[in-house]
Each structure stands twice: as structure tokens, then as C-alpha cells.
Amino acid sequence: MARCSLKKIVLVAVASISVAWLGFLGYSYAFAFRQKSILRYKLEEELKSYWGKNLVPETEEEKEKEKMGFQLNGFNQFRSDRIALNREIPDTRDPRCVDRRYRTDLPTASVVIIFHNEAFTVLLRTITSVLERSPEELIHEVVLVDDFSDHEDLKKKLEDWISPSTKIKLVRHSKREGLIRARITGASAATGDVLVFLDSHCEANIGWLEPLLERIKAHPGVRGGFNWGLQFKWKKIPDYEQERRDHDETREVKSPTMAGGLFAIDRKYFYHIGAYDMGMSIWGGENLEISFRVWMCGGQLEIIPCSRVGHIFRKRQPYTFPGGVDKILVKNNMRLAEVWMDEYKEHYYAKRPGIEKRDYGDTSERVELRKKLQCKSFDWFLKHVYPELPLPNENLWHGGALHNPHSRLCLDTYGHREGGEVGLYMCHGQAGNQEFGFTDLGELQFEEDLCLDVASQRPGAHITILNCHGLGGNQRWIYDNKTHVMQHSVSRHCLDVGEGKTAVMNVCVPGSSSQEWVFARHYVPKRRLKEPEHK
């Protein structure tokens, strides 16, 4: 058995590097806040002094080059190419982190970076930041795994660039394997004490490595969570965890799950608990799978606020998935659900009706691994690690897509979060942005903790997504089971199909086809706090 001190995954506090590549600006520990445009405007001239010059294209040729860079990568490659690989960046750590001293017997790290057609300067900046902002004695090696790239500058040009370094290994795949299997390749090539996985579009900040290694050595705002559609979510740190930390924002945060892009784990422990599920493809779901496995099999997962690494969050994926994104994600999530979620897997299938008969491959080895490690049940995980996660459908009368039969449109969040507005989109049957629930409190709920709210009583008012408060008011709705009309309790207006496929509130018109709304599923709530108004 692995020693207790090794049973830990530690996560860096991720900062967003905007697609315009301005770096560490609007940044809070453990959560990627996208910077405000006003901040970008005020600081751009100042940043040029040490982050690069001539960042804005001036000629038509340069403008076209910038446009092509966005199309190819999903971020501003033009700007990246004009910024020094070893640029100075602000130290964004809490001052208490800066003053902290770390033990001298820390384990060594193998930093594993997977890339597939990554922008050349972005990849080099990731490598450079790791080597230059880490104590030399702690970096055992940087392992680069090329997942079958075909960009010319990632071939001999890259090999020439890394050749002077004795600490960089380059491993190339002969076919596309995807992130999950590529990380296994990198881990197999690594020989350091600790594996640190980074995406290929990152930038390590000052003092990023030591706090990760110390937590693994000693006892190997938000934290990671998930919803029943098996999507990773950032969640507010609950009061009980804040109290355990004595409200000290520099202390580790115990997190139920991780996003998966950036983390560190003891190499021997990584293999002891089963590395990655090789039956999964490309990426997606592997972050929740390893999170559940670590907690249920005796380990812990923590966010380390004093470790800061910037990460580019792309506006879109610049590459495709063989067979399509949904096919890969469903297969991976089904493997996760079948092996680790016990009877609770039915909640995932309820969110994705019709997928139960899809092939998810042979999971017998992973089931045997769970038995061998004597892992706890998923019920234990929910009660002891993530007790604040509500069970779905306990308080629902209706759920699934809410569609208007006349227009064949469904209510859709368009990916908006709190403060955003809902609209209408062609029904796709894939849940996600079109998955709503009508609760026993008369709420129109999205993702368990967000509710549809109407603040204006004027006709034509739009519908806003806000945190559920459970007090009724602007978040209370009345649904007519016979006419299928959805009426707002305060304004007494009805949900309507507006011009341009918008969702609006209008004066109720009996028999109006644009005000007819049908849910995909119907329930009898197990937790019936209050009978909602039905007609």
C-alpha cells in the first residue's frame, strides 16, 4: 500500500490568460476570472514596457495574420509571437505566500506537457516559464509528448530549440492518441518523484512549484464540483471548509473534483491508484474519474492557493474529435458512471436520455481495480466529501427540455451563467444548455443552483439567470398542465416566443401557440416542500 503521505493530488490556482494574451490581470486564487475590458484598456500601455511591443497589427498583412492566428488556435497567436518567452509578469500571490519558507528536502518534479498542433511560441513560453520560475534542483525534467502534430514548426525547429537543454525529453506519437493516453505516455517516460501535468498553453508564475511539492511531501473563494450531467463546475467554498481553514486564503482547499488541466501527484501513487482509464478517449470525464477515485480510495485532492499558473481559456477548440465531441464525452462519462457512481449513475442517465444502450467498452479491469484498492462507495463520497451537492429530481415536477411545439424551439441558456439571459434555440435533445427543471417551489431551475428570474413587469421583458434564493417572488412560476402555459407569479405574464427567436414575457393570450410550453419529462417529487401552483 502507498504511504498516507502520498495519497494526495494538489492543484495549482489557475489564472486566466485572455485570448488577447494580456496575461495575469483579473485573477483570484483557484478560479479563472476573465479580465474586464476596462482593465485591459487602462493597463495595455503599461504592459507593453515589459510584455512586448508592437502588439497591435498595423498593416493589412498583419491584420490578416492576426485573424488567421485566431482561426487556427482559438487565441491571439500574433500577439504571443511578439512577446518575450521569458517576459516579466507580476507576482500575484498573497503577500503571506511570498514570505512563506519551504522545507529543503522537497521531492523532485517531472513536468509533463502534452501538445497537439500547439502554437509554437505558446508552447515555448510554457516550457520557459517552468524552467525559469522553478528552483533548478526541484525540476528533474520536462517531458514533452507530441500527440501526432503536423505543424512544421513543431518538428525539427522544436527539436533544435530544446536540444541545448539536458532537462527536456521529447516523445512523439505515431498516431493521434488524445490527452488521456498521451499523459500516460508522459508519465511512463518520467522518472522524477512527483508528476506535474500542465496544459501546453500555460505560464507558470513565481514560486509556483514549491507549495505543490511541500503539500505532497508533508501530507500528500472556490473549489471544484460537478453537476449530474458530469460537467465540472467551480463552486463557492462552503462555510464548513472555510472554518477548517480558519478563513486563511493561503491555506489549502480540499476540493471534491478538479478541472484536470494542471495538477501534481506523487508518481508512485499515480500508478498505485490506476493512473488513467485507458478505455477513455481523447479527453473529457478523466478529471472527474480520477477525482472520485482519489477520494473514494483513501486519498485527498487539494487546491494550493500559493501556487499560481496562468492558463489560456480558448473561445473554441481549434481541433476536432474523431466521431464528434458528444460521442467521445458520452463514452468517457458512461465509463466513469458505471465504475464509480454505483446506484447514483441513474441520475446521469436521466440527464442524458437515450444513451443507455451506447457501447462504453470493457470496464472489468477498472472494476477490479476498485475492488483491489478497497475503495468506498459513491454514497460515502456524497456524504463526506461533497455533501452540498443536491440530488436531482428530488424536488422536481417536470424536467428536461422545455420546448414550444409550434416553433420547435427550446428554451436555451446559450452557455450564459448568473446575470445572463436565456433565449430560444433549435431543440437538440442533448440536455446541457436546454436542461431545466420545474421544482416544488415553482422555480424554473437550471443546474441545481440557478433559477430563471423576471424583474420587470412590462410586456417584452427578458428572463435572467440568477442564483436560486428559494423565496419565490420573481423566481416563482405557475405551470398549467392542461394548456401548457408557463406564467410568472408576480407579473402574471406568460412565457412567449418573441421576435428573432427570443424568449420574452408577454400578456397571456388564451390559446396562443407561441405561449405553449411542454417539458420532456414528468416526476412526482420525493422532497415535496411545497405544492407549486398548477392549473
Image (tube, rainbow, N blue to C red):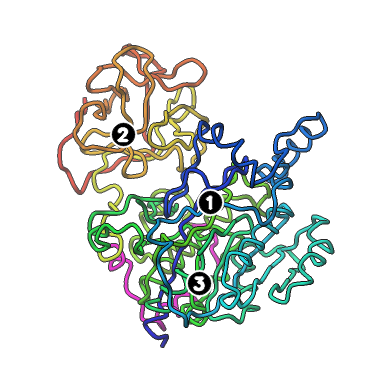
Give residue 53's position: percent from left, percent from top: 71, 41
Q: Secondary structure at mark 3?
A: loop
Q: Residue at x 68, y 53 (%)?
A: 122
Give residue 255's position: percent from left, percent from top: 36, 61
Quadrant housing the C terminus: top left
Amino acid, disc 3:
Thr
**Of the residues under marks 2 and 3, which one precedes in the sequence?**
3
Give residue 37's position: percent from left, percent from top: 53, 32
**Of the residues under marks 1 and 2, which one precedes in the sequence?**
1
Identify the residue under disc 3.
Answer: 363
Q: Residues within 10 Å of mark 3 (few under 14, many from 20)?
A: some
Instruction: Give the CA separation, mark 1 to mark 2.
Output: 43 Å
Q: Is residue 372 above or below residue 287?
A: below
Question: Mark 1 or mark 2: which is in front?
Answer: 1
- What segment is highlighted magenta in the picture? 357-382
Identify the residue under disc 2.
Answer: 444
Question: Mark 3 or mark 1: which is in front?
Answer: 1
Q: Residue at x 27, y 27 (%)?
A: 479
Q: Nearer the viewer, residue 50 or 29?
A: 50
